Image: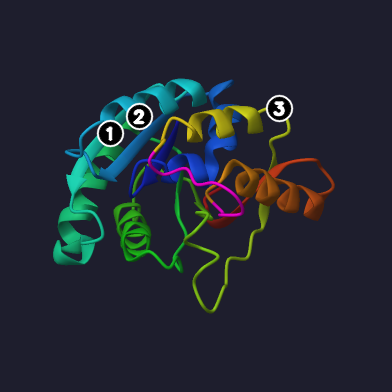
Amino acid sequence: MTLIVASHPDDECLGCGATIKKLSNTCEVNLLLLGEGRRAGVVDCVKKAADALGIQHYDILDFPDQQYDTVSLLEITQAIEHYISKDLPDTIYTHHRNDLNKDHRITYGAVLTACRVGPVKKIYTFETLSSTEWQYPYIFSPNVWVDVKKTIPAKTYAMQMYSTEIREGFHPRSIRGILNQARYRGQQVGCEYAEAFELVREVI
């Protein structure tokens, strides 16, 4: 089973939406969103996006948006540990350690802490458009690529469920931006569209 741990609604879609859809064809994929659970309309958006991506189960917690640093790391870690012990995932996808967004960085640290010992054999980090590439220095160094030619349409469709987060024009969170990034990652490995990840840990 694969668990996606993301800070906010839409991060899962931006970071690995097409990979989620591809994985969901062969295994169970669940989603844990750490924040914004109380914001109006969030649950409906998440449900629609989750349905589009084939996510079987999702949970939305209510850690304060852009204020994860006001909460103890222990509390966030324990929340993640609860879902790991409940779902028993062998694989986790989460944020990159060097994102500009501080909630993303804290989520990464909490995931690694929660996975000290347990069922998780693989941990991947993803790039979140309008966060990872805006950090300086930019140090996202992918070592795993997923061919998502068949599932990139599901990602762009799911992203449109987050109507308040999607942008127009040349913004990285526009549909154009999402497709351009997937084309760029694809050309690195000789396919039309790809999503890229850093494999942080693998237990064989």
Rendered image: mark on residue 42: 1
Disc 3 marks a residue whose amino acid type is: Lys
Residue 75: where, in percent of width, then height? 15, 55
Decide: marks 2, 1 in contact (CB < 8 A)? Answer: yes
Q: Is residue 183 above or below residue 20?
A: below
In this orientation, does residue 134 appear? yes
Residue 168 in the figure: left or right of residue 101: right
Q: Quadrant of the N terminus?
A: top left
Q: Which residue is mark 3?
A: 150
Magenta segment boundaries in residue numbering: 164-172
Rendered image: mark on residue 45: 2
Residue at the image point whose x is 47% and y is 43% from the top = 166
Q: CA distance from mark 2 to mark 1?
A: 5 Å
In the depicted view, which residue is nearer to us: 90 or 10? Answer: 10
Residue at the image point whose x is 33% and y is 50% from the top = 7
Please, which residue is most extreme toward the right here?
190
Disc 1 marks a residue whose amino acid type is: Val
Q: Is residue 32 magenta?
A: no
- Secondary structure, mark 1, is helix
Magenta-highlighted stretch: main secondary structure? Answer: loop
